[in-house]
Image: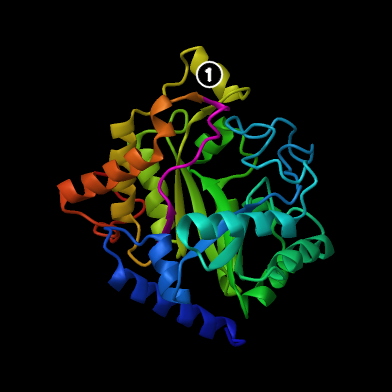
Amino acid sequence: MARLSAPAQRAHYREAGRNGQAAMHKRYNDLATHLRAMFGCRVQKISVDAGLSCPNRDGRLATGGCIYCNARGSGTGAHRAGRSIALQLAAGKQALARRYGAEKFIAYFQSFSNTYAPVPVLKTLYDEALGVPGIVGLSIGTRPDCVSPPVLELLADYARERLVWVEYGLQSARDETLARIRRGHDAECFFRAAALTRRRGIRICAHVILGLPGETRADMLYTAGRLADTGIDGLKLHLLYVIKGTPMEALWRSGEYRCLEQQEYVDLVCDVLERIPAAVVIQRLTGDPHPEELAAPAWCRNKAATLASIEAELERRDSHQGVRAGASARGPVS
C-alpha cells in the first residue's frame, strides 16, 4: 500500500469494509471476507509469542493475573521454546498456506500484553515481524492500561503504510465485574485508550467475554451498547471457559460458578451482534481453548458446531449484525 495520511488510510479501510460487507454471505461482517476485500486474496493471522509480560502478573498491579488466565496467558509457549518471531511466522505461513490457501498474513502478537515494554524493544519486535515476506500487517493484543503516547505514535507510524490493529481486552463495561475478575483497571481506562488510539488512525478491536461471574444478560448487552457508541473497528467475543489451575476452576468446582450452556451462549452472541454496527468487523465469535487445559464446558471443544448454531439462530430470527445498533447504550435492555 502506498504511504497514506492517517485520515486517508482510514477512509481506504472503511471503503474496503463496505466492499466486504456487500460481498459477505453471512449475517455478520466476518474478518475473512473483510480481509479478502482489502487484499484480494485469503489472509490469515499467525499467532506470535514475543515473550512479554503483563502488569497483572509481574507485580506492578498484581501477581496472580485475571481469575480466568493461567501462566501461559493464551500463548503458544513458542518464545519459551526459543523460537524467534521470524521462525514462528515462517512456520505459521507454511501451515496456513497449506490448510487454507492463504497468500498473505498478519502477525498477531497474542500472548500477554504486547505493548508492555520500552518503545525500542517493541520496535525491534514489530520490525522483525514486518520483515518476514508476506506479512502485510500487525495485530497487537494488549491491555488498555499498557499503552502510552510514545507507543501509540510508534504504531501510528506503522499504520501509515500497513494494516495495524490494536486489540484491547475490555471483557466487560461493568466496573464491578472487572473488580470481580481482578482485571486491574476500570472500564473508563478502555474508553480513554480507545479514544487516543482512534485519534492516531489505528484500528481498534475490543475483546469481550460472555458469561463472566455475576453478569446478567442485561450487563452483557450494556457492554455491547457502550462499544456500539465508541466507534470500534472490530470485535472479538469469547466464551468464559474454565482453565485448569486458575481461580475460575476453584469457583467452578465449588459450585460458585456455572458455565453457560451452548444455547445460552449462542443466544447471547446473537443479541450482541444485533447491537453492534454493521461496519464493525467481527474477528471472533468464540475462543479456542487448549484441549489439555480445558476444565469446562466440554461443548466448547466443538467450535464449528457453535459457529453453525450462531448462524442458524440468526437465520431463525431473520436477523443480522447491527439490526438493533441504534438503541442507546444506557437505555433499557430488552
Q: Which residue is at 57% across, 75% downward? A: 201
Task: Please indicate whether residue 282 sits to the left or right of residue 141 in the image.
Answer: left
Q: Which residue is at 60% across, 58% downward? A: 94
Q: Is residue 161 above or below residue 108?
A: below
Which residue type carries mark 1? Leu
Q: Position of residue 259 (x, y in %)?
A: 41, 25
Specify whether residue 283 is painted magenta: yes
In the rendered image, which residue does mark 1 sit on? 251
Q: Residues within 10 Å of mark 1 (few under 14, many from 20)?
A: some
Task: Please indicate whether residue 45 sits to the left or right of residue 100 in the image.
Answer: right
Q: Position of residue 224 (x, y in %)?
A: 39, 50
Near-viewer residue (232 or 285): 285
Q: Position of residue 261 (x, y in %)?
A: 34, 28
Q: Which residue is at 76% across, 46% downward? A: 79
- Magenta part of the protein: which range? 280-294
Specify whether residue 99 is painted magenta: no
* Image quarter (top left, top right, bottom left or bottom right) of the C terminus: top left
Q: Is residue 332 visible?
A: no
Please tell me whether the stretch drawn in magenta is mainly helix, strand or loop: loop
Asked where in the image residue 262 lies, by quadrant, the reply is: top left
Point out the residue furthest to the front here.
98
Q: Is residue 248 visible?
A: yes
* Image quarter (top left, top right, bottom left or bottom right) of the N terminus: bottom right
